[in-house]
Image (tube, grey):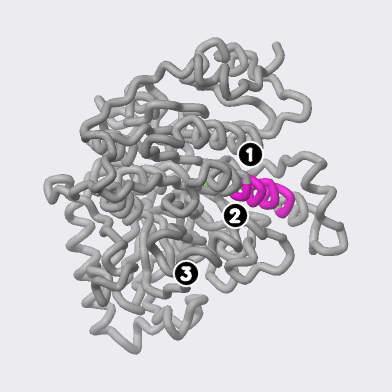
């Protein structure tokens, strides 16, 4: 079966997904609410883009986004692996609060009576934005629950085009709510010649933007790029001369990153074509640090670890109407995306939501001197970390941390670093500053005591050390 590329007209005719409008239509007296787009890369390294100092991969569109927006040098995800990180971002709450500590994996061991996914009592950013009258779309990788009740169409998203788990690069997604007739494309699940998921998601994002240009929308674009396997089409490889790369694998990774960068450019172009770029708040980040062929330098280690290379990621906000372009060095978190998006949409953040993230806008707009946040926390099985100010106390994985995503880890001693002086976490100050260790340990213990036991754990055969 040929994968049908929908014309906009046909797509419009097929667009039957309902969405609620909890607020009155826009009026001329009220400033027009912005569209909000979250572009999430998968396993993109801290230094894999020009905007973050990378030299070997041309990323002009991501660099332009950083140039036109706020680029954070210390943007964090809540976990160094995919699923829990996405859960934190989507809910604005530490995912361990609802038992979501580990990857969603069909072989994981569930606690009796437990289900694997974002607990149904939790609200996602899709729910929050839809309640404000936004039409909501989710594209690409979901990976926060496989059962119906956990899928994006049941968790706040009107239009879904993607996969419950990890998409393939050369196979169209499994779900297409806007075009039920297209389900066959998902069922066939065969590689298509000249098909590339990164391009397909771009096309779908562009269609979504054009189609909803007259109403406020929220669009979550969760790329598979640049997660392994190293699969890419010739089009991108052709741009990258072999001699520019230290290995062929790095070149393949670069080509996948180039496709991701083109996708960012395609989305921006669609916004421009529809006159929407100025009043669209765009977040760009990666769900965790880079693995294998990625470049996380100067950070220590990478994906799977609570060292900086696992959790510190590219983090860019562009909202041309409202935010002055600049570089900020204050730590921010993926937890902040939900409250910032809600506030941008003129929504009120209810204390009952018990969010862990903060609305970045008053601080970014200069209405407040600083960000109101005490500390940031991480826990993934035996690994953990807490950051307050420039100080980080961490129990991180030892050994092959930079290249593996194994969740269960052997960890070393608790170590203390001053990240302002030691971004690479090379000089452990724990013995020199026992009082600081005690202080941060107490902070962490207090946070840790608020968390649930994980509702599922990695599959048998991987020994899980005691917390
Ligand atoms: Ca990932």
Q: Which residue is label 1 attached to?
A: 198
Residue 270 quadrant: top right
For label 3, the SS is loop
Label 3 – label 1 distance at C-alpha: 27 Å
Instruction: Single out the residue that lies furthest toward the bottom.
Output: 432
Instruction: Single out the residue that lies furthest toward the left.
Output: 352
Residue occupying image coordinates x 63% and y 61%: 48
* Left or right of 247 on screen, residue 167: left
Quadrant for the C terminus in the image: bottom left
| Percent coordinates x, y for residue 398 in the rendering | 50, 64
Disc marking residue 64: none
Residue occupying image coordinates x 74% and y 65%: 56
Closer to us: mark 3 or mark 2? 3
Q: Which residues are magenta?
A: 254-265
Helix, strand or loop for the magenta stretch, by majority: helix
Classify 420 as above or below 203. below
| Percent coordinates x, y for residue 246 in the rendering | 79, 63
């Amino acid at each position: 079966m040929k994968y049908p590329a929908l014309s906009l007209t046909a797509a419009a005719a097929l667009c039957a997904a309902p969405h609620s409008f909890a607020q009155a239509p826009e009026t001329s007296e009220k400033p027009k609410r912005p569209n909000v787009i979250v572009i999430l890369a998968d396993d993109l390294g801290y230094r894999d883009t020009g905007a973050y100092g990378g030299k070997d991969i041309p990323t002009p569109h991501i660099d332009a986004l950083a140039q036109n927006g706020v680029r954070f040098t210390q943007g964090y995800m809540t976990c160094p692996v995919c699923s829990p990180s996405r859960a934190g971002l989507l809910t604005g709450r530490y995912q361990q609060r609802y038992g979501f500590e580990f990857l969603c994996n069909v072989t994981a061991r569930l606690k009796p009576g437990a289900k694997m996914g974002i607990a149904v009592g939790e609200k996602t950013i899709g729910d929050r934005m839809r309640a404000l009258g936004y039409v909501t779309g989710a594209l690409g990788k979901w990976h926060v629950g496989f059962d119906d009740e956990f899928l994006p169409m049941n968790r706040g998203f009107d239009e879904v085009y993607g996969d419950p788990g990890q998409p393939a690069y050369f196979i169209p997604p499994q779900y297409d709510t806007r075009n039920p007739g297209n389900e066959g494309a998902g069922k066939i699940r065969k590689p298509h010649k000249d098909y590339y998921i990164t391009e397909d998601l771009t096309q779908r994002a562009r269609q979504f933007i054009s189609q909803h240009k007259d109403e406020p929308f929220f669009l979550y674009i969760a790329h598979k790029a640049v997660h392994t396997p190293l699969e890419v089409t010739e089009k991108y490889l052709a741009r990258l001369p072999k001699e520019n790369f230290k290995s062929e694998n790095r070149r393949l990774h670069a080509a996948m990153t180039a496709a991701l960068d083109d996708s960012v450019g395609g989305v921006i172009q669609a916004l421009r074509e529809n006159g929407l770029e100025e009043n669209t708040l765009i977040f760009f980040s990666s769900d965790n640090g880079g693995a294998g062929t990625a470049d996380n330098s100067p950070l220590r280690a990478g994906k799977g670890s609570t060292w900086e290379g696992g959790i510190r990621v590219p983090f860019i906000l562009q909202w041309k109407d409202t935010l002055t372009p600049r570089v900020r060095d204050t730590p921010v978190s993926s937890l902040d995306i939900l409250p910032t998006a809600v506030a941008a949409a003129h929504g009120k953040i209810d204390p009952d939501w018990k969010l862990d993230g903060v609305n970045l806008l008053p601080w970014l707009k200069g209405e407040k001197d600083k960000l109101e946040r005490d500390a940031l926390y991480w826990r993934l099985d035996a690994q953990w970390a807490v950051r307050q100010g420039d100080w980080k106390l961490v129990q991180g994985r030892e050994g092959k941390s930079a290249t593996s995503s194994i969740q269960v880890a052997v960890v070393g001693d608790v170590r203390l670093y001053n990240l302002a002086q030691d971004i690479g976490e090379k000089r452990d100050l724990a013995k020199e500053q026992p009082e600081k260790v005690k202080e941060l340990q107490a902070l962490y213990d207090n946070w840790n005591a608020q968390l649930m036991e994980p509702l599922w754990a990695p599959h048998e055969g991987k020994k899980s050390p005691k917390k």
